[in-house]
Structures are given as structure tokens and as C-alpha cells.
Amino acid sequence: MILPCFPHWAGEEGIGEVSTVAITGLERDGMIAAIFSGFLLALLAPTVVRLARRQAGWLLALLPAGLTLYFARLLGPVSAGRTVAVSVPWVPDLGISLSFYLDGLSLLFALLICGVGALVVVYAGSYLKGHPHLGRFYLYLLAFMASMLGLVLADNGLTMFVFWELTGLASFLLIGFEHERESARAAALQALLVTGAGGLALLAGLVLLAQASGSAELSTLLQNGRSLQGHPLYLPILLLVLAGAFTKSAQFPFHFWLPGAMEAPTPVSAYLHSATMVKAGVYLLARLSPVLGGSDAWHYLVVGAGTATMLLGALIALWQADLKRLLAYSTVSTLGALVLLLGLDTVLSVKAATLFLLAHALYKGALFLVAGVVDHETGTRDVTRLGNLARAMPVTALAAGLAALSMAGLPPLLGFINKELLYEAKLQAPRAAVWVTGAGVLANVCLVAVAGTVGLAPFLRRRADLPKKPHEAPPAMLLGPAVLAAMSLLCGLFPETVANSLLSAAVSAVRAQPTVVELKLWHGINPVFALSVLTLAAGAGLFAARDVLRRAGALGDAVGRFGPQRWYQGLLAGLNGLARAQTRLLQHGYLRLYLMTVILTTVGLVGSALLLGGGEVRPMGGLGDVRFHEWVIAALILLGALMAVTTSSRLAAAAALSVIGYGVALIYMLFSAPDLAMTQFAVETLTVILFVLVVYRLPRFAALSGRGARVRDALVALLAGGLMTALVLIATSVPREPHLAAFFAQYSWPLAKGRNVVNVILVDFRALDTLGEITVLGVAAIGVYALLRLRPSSHPR
Amino acid sequence: METILAFVIGGLYAAGLYMLLRRSLVKLVIGLALLGQAANLLIFTLGRLLRGRPPLVPPDAAALAGSSADPVPQALILTAIVIGFGVHAFTIILIKRAYQTVDSDDLDDFRTTDQ
């Protein structure tokens, strides 16, 4: 099929439109409704589960099924080259809008998200039948589905980031769903931390990207093409975006969180950790490859990480015994292959990647669901114990067999066409084609063996050692595997339909130019076919030797112990240790050390300001006018202070305090403050009485600190005292203009009819303050009374 | 006189802070009392010192003479003395009660809220 005219990347509906297939306003606005209906249903899910009980899964699946139909209806217009865009202002000041944009790539993902979503929702209803938190499970699962839809449909980079993080959050909640298991909690946290750290890098990358290009809208970015590649920010942007994509899509060295995520219930593994969420990184690479792709840095980083991940995942998968871990590592390998293909950045490689995305979602989703069925019906996922299930579970066996054959790449399944295209793309790689192809063949050989181990051996093997007698699963659990496996077959039989309706548009979106995908089941005998046959033969050999390999796997595990998982644990332990150490250092709980920090900081800041600011000390008036009795009073106060500090008797300290208090009162009296003097005399007397009344109920003075601590504290205290002295000397040497005093001096008598200005201020001009003061005293009195009279009942003392 | 009071204030601050840095509960209270005196005296001195001219309007005048002492710092200190007394009384009773409850006057034993 030849597209008449591929519209340019303009936002609205495509400009220069020739196609006759129209997109109605309803369909455009439907995009926002599609996303937010998922969140709404998520909130309602617990209620639906409570009311509908057994039928809840079927009922809730109506929404994803309906959405699948909605997106399927858009297949026609989109494959004819149209795009759908809709935008709602969100944070206009920051240039953030809730804008959504649908093209071939988004549509492929949206169909997978809703289609697989519907099957998984039905499946989970049966898989988790009777689980006390099924409602909560659906809440998380549907919220994930809506977030993932938002992620692939978002046009604004920051909107996409928000949905990106929401999927991570949903993944965290779903992995930790069995939260009573420590391993589930640890795996959930690990996934959250790894993908969350990558998410932050992505945010930085997207912000830089928006700054460098002047627009946060992805559709505008795509329009500008690769013009950014000479920009000085290009490399930072690339590295940050890749960090986000690689963590989310479990690329080496961040791959380790994905096998851990198998702690989640199996429907979650099938949905999030195989078919959709882990491909968000692949989506991001595909989406941004028209902008960031094609450079040397892109090529080496993306191809390098992809190849390493592909080989590592495939090799480690070989010696796993647990069905889900086998599938998890093979998923890691596939994600690596997808990233590798996008890194190659040729038309053929993008075609292969797009097809692989679809083929993998179909067969791996089916196999994961089958693994869940097997686990559910037999009570074990250990491949060394499973066997002979074909007779008891014929439908499951058929679905598993089809999916496994697709995974292994046998005709007439979609996986076969896919593998041919993969090899073709790798053979035509622009650089190091031989090595890339060799790595691809090696990985695929391993995956053929894995496919046999997962999809064939448990059903056909003669020996079996099962915890319980297997039965065929209920229909709700068979629907998913059966539909997905059937799709693998149908798409393999009618590849042209898939290519025309879905893949051409997706590839065109990734290449940012109209591209036609032609798929055939049979290509004839050529080098690619030879590689396929070689892969199958070698894979069959590995499959036969799988038990030997599994035993040899202990060696691999020993090596793996020094891998990235270990780095993660070390990093986490280091982070926790750092937090603990700095908390111990700063929040030690010793009052006097807090005080010392405050004092030293004040002395340091004020002291340095005084020294640098050139505060000049000019003693005013000198000492000549000081009278003898004033000398005596000053000396008495200082002596009193010394005595209060040094005495070891509580009574002597009280006496010293009153010497100081009366001394200060005398100073008030001598220097024109008779009111202060009178108040001070009264208060000092009261204080002494109070102190003497309770002094023998108080603990004795104990010398608790050592000599060193006392000297240190004395130095700190003297430093602070010296600072205060310097402050007073400086402050009193600066001329002062008492505006306030002039006001009160003038109006005290005419306005308030009072001759004692201090009293007038207190009871008239600032009477409310005095009321507050009286209130404080009242509260203090109540507090004293309460402390003296009331006894807590728990304390019999 | 300001110069002498500057050193008296410094001495009172040093003594008060030194007592605050002790581990003993009773010494903490004495430190607070010393700091209160130091702060009052600081405000008083910053308002300038004048001998024998209290801020009283003479019976035959309508306004205060320009050479009288500043009434504003005095009003502030008067409030501070009274509030200081309230705080002091409350603190004395509080540490008495705390000593009864915790059975220790070592502040290092007051590091957690659990007994």
C-alpha cells in the first residue's frame, strides 16, 4: 500500500490532508476521556469488587475492552497518515499543558495497553479469587493502565513525565502487593528506587530538551527533526534521557530490578513487567529517535547497552529453574534486543523493532499468564518438578505451545516473521554487522531453549513431581493465554493486514517519514532463513542439555553475586549509613551540645561581621565619671555571678542570684529608673522565697562534667560574653535618636493624664501588651499549680 | 559607666551560658536566671544611662524635659522582669517535677521521650 501523502508533523489533524478518512471531534476529545476514565474506574474498583464479587473481573474489563475498540477504530485514519491532537491548558505559566497526541507509535502501544489490559483484568479476577485485597489490586492495576495510556499519548514532555512516574508508582504498589512478605517489599522498593532515579534524570533531560529547542511539545520537537544535534546541550540531554529509558526498560547495568519484580502477582508480571511498562523506555527511545537519534554517541550507547542486555538476559535465563524468572530474564533479553534495534537506526531495524514489540507482547504475555495458570493449578513453578500437564490441561497446553513456538520463531507464527526481519536488520547494520548479528544469533539460540523449557517441557515431559493434582484452569484464566496465542498465529498467517494497518503507521512515526512495511510469511531460502534454521537447531541442542546447564548455573550465580545487584545494595547501605551518621552527628539529643552549636554559630557570624564590618569600639566618656559606689555594685554583681557558677551549694547559688538581682536593681535606681528598681526588688524577694521553699526538693548540685568539658564550656561562655561586651561597647558609641521617647515625653500628660511616663506607656499606650503579660503570668501560675497539685494516674509517686 | 556595665553584661552572659551548658538540671535554671538579668541590663544600657533624671513629668509642666531618661527601654524591661519572674517560677517547679518523674537531674538522661 502506498500512502498518498504523509502529513507533516503539525499538531491538528494533519495539514495538507488528502485522505478521506475523517477524525471526528468526538474521537479527538475521546482521547482525554480514555485516559481519565481509567483513573475514575480505578477509584470505583474497590466498590465494584465488593458489590459484584465473582463477576468483578469481567465487569471491570469492560472499560479496557471498550477502549481497545475505540483505539481500533482509529486504526483506519491513523494508518492513512493522520494524527490526533488535543490540548488543555494545565500550568500555562510554565508552558505545561495537558496535551495529547496520537500517531502510529502511540496507537500501537495504546492497543497493547488496553487489549492486554482487558485480558489481564479478567484473568486476575480468577487468579486472585477470594483475595481480601482484590479491590485494592484492581485500583492499582487500573490506575497503572490509565497512567500508561497517558504516558504513550502525552505530547507535552512534562505531562509525559508525570505519567511516567505514575506508572512507576503503580508498579511499586503492585510489586509490593503481597506486602506481608519482606522479599516483596524489598523488590518493590528496589524497582521504585532504580526507576525513580532514572525518572529524575529523565525529568532533567526533558527540561533541558525543552530549553534547547524552545518547546516542550514532543510534536513540535519532531517537526524540527535532528537540528538539535549540534547544540552544546545535546550530549547532556542524550545521557539523561537514556538514563531514564535504560532504568525503566531494565537495560544493563540496571536490569536487576526486573527479575526482582517477579514478586508481584503473575497477572502484574504479564502486564507491567513484560507487555507494557518495561517497554516505556523503548517507547521513549523510539519517540525521541527522530530528534536525538543517529549520532555516534546515540549509536554506541544505545547499541552497546542493548547488546549487553540482550546477551546477559538470554544467558542468565538458561539456568533459571523458576518459570517466572526464566520469563523475566528472557524479557530482559528482548528489551535489550529492542533497544539494540533502535540504536541501529535504520529503516529495517525500526521495522524489526516495531514488529518485535508486538510479537513479544503477544507471546510473552501468553507465556506469563500460562505460568500463572500452572502455578495456580499445580502449586509449583519449578521446571524441574513440572511435567505431563498436557493431558490434564489441554487448552493451556495448546496456548503455551503456540506461544512458545512463536517465541522460538517457528512458522507459521508471528515470531518466525519477526526473527527473519531481526536477522535481516542486523545483517544490514551500519557498523559491526557481523558482531551484532552474531550476538543476536547467540541470544536467540538461548531464547529457543528457554521457550522450550517454559512452553513445552512442563506439558510434554513424562516425569512430574507435583504438589497437587492439576486441573484445567477456569475460563477466566484461559481466555488471556488463548486469545494472545491465537493472535500470534493469526498475525503470522495474515502478516499483510498487521503490516498495513498498524506497523506502517508506527514505523512512519518513528522514522518521521512515510514508510511502508511489507511482511511475508515465506521469504524463500536465503542467508536469513539459513540463520533461522541454525538458531533453531542450536536452540534445540541447548534445550536438550538444559538440565546440565542448570547445574552449571551455580558458577554463573557466583559471578553474578558481584554484579549490579551487589552495587545497588552497597549504594543503598551507604546511603542509609550516611543518613544515620549525619543524624547522629546533628540530632544527638544532648541539650548542651545543641546550645553550644547555637552559641558558636552566633559568635562566629556576629563576630566575623563585627571584625569585617569594622565596628569601631570608642568607649564613651571613659571611666573618669564613675563613682565609687558604682564600682562596688558592679564588682558585687560580677562576684555574685562567679559565685553562682562555682559554688557547690544550691542555697549559696540562690543567695548569689539575689545578690546579682539586688545589684541590678540598684543600678536601675541610680540611673533614673525607679519603677524598674521597685519591681526588681519585689521580684527578687519573691524568687528567693520560692527558691528556698523548694530548694530541698531539688536535686543536689552534682559535678557531672569532667574537667576538660568544664574548661571547654568556660571558653565558649567567655567567648560569647566577650562578644556581648564588644556589642555593648560598639552600640553605645553610636549616636542615638530617640524618636519614640520624644513622642511619649510630649503626649504622656496631655493625652493620658499621667506624669510617670513609664507607667503611662504600660497601662495606656501599650495597655494591650500589658494585658498579654498578665495573661502569661496567669498561665504560668496555672502551670505551677498543675505541676504541684496534679498527679498523673500512671505514676504512683 | 557604660564601659563598666558592658563588662558586667558580658560577665553575666558568660556565667549564664556556662550554666546552661552544664548537665545538671538545677544549674540550667540558674543559667536562665542569669541570662534574664544580663538581657535586661543590656537593654537598659543601650537606652543610655543618666543619673537622677527619671522619666517623670514635673507637676508644673505638661511635657517631659528633653534631658530625662528614655522611658521606652524602661517600659520594655519592666515587662521583661515580670515575665521573667513567671518563667522562672514555672521552670523551678517544672524541674522539681521532672526530677521526681525521671528520677535524675542529669540532662543526658532526658534524651528520649520514652522512659
Image (cartoon, coloured by chain):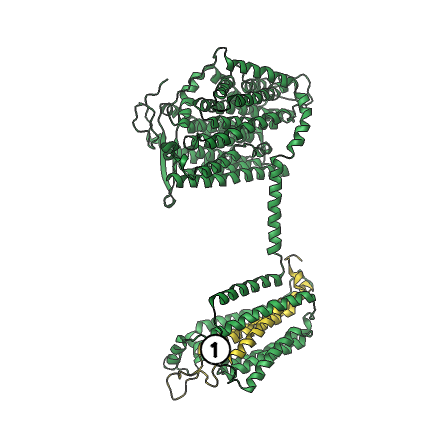
Chain colours: A green, B yellow
Disc tally is 1
Disc 1 designates what residue?
A: B74
Number of other residues with Cα within 10 Å of mark 1, as a class: few under 14, some 14 to 19, many 20 or more: many
Which of the image's four quarters has the N terminus of chain A?
A: top left
Amino acid at circle 1: Gln
- Where residue A531 sits, quadrant-wise, is top right
Which of the image's four quarters has the C terminus of chain A?
A: bottom right
Q: Nearer the viewer, residue A134 or A102?
A: A102
Decide if residue A734 is on the left or right side of residue A719. Answer: left
- Where residue A684 sits, quadrant-wise, is bottom right
Q: Looking at the image, can residue B28 be seen?
A: no
- Where residue A515 sits, quadrant-wise, is top left
Q: Is residue A287 above or below residue B101?
A: above
Q: Nearer the viewer, residue B78 or A537?
A: A537
Q: Looking at the image, can residue A519 be seen?
A: yes
- Residue A448 lies, in percent from the top left, at 58, 19
- Residue A724 lies, in percent from the top left, at 53, 71
Decide if residue A57 is on the left or right side of residue A101. Answer: right
Q: Nearer the viewer, residue A648 or A533?
A: A533
Q: Is residue A682 above or below residue B107?
A: below
Q: Is residue A15 above or below residue A427?
A: below
Q: Residue at x 65, y 70 (%)?
A: B26
- Residue A143 lies, in percent from the top left, at 49, 36
Q: Is residue A367 above or below residue A657?
A: above
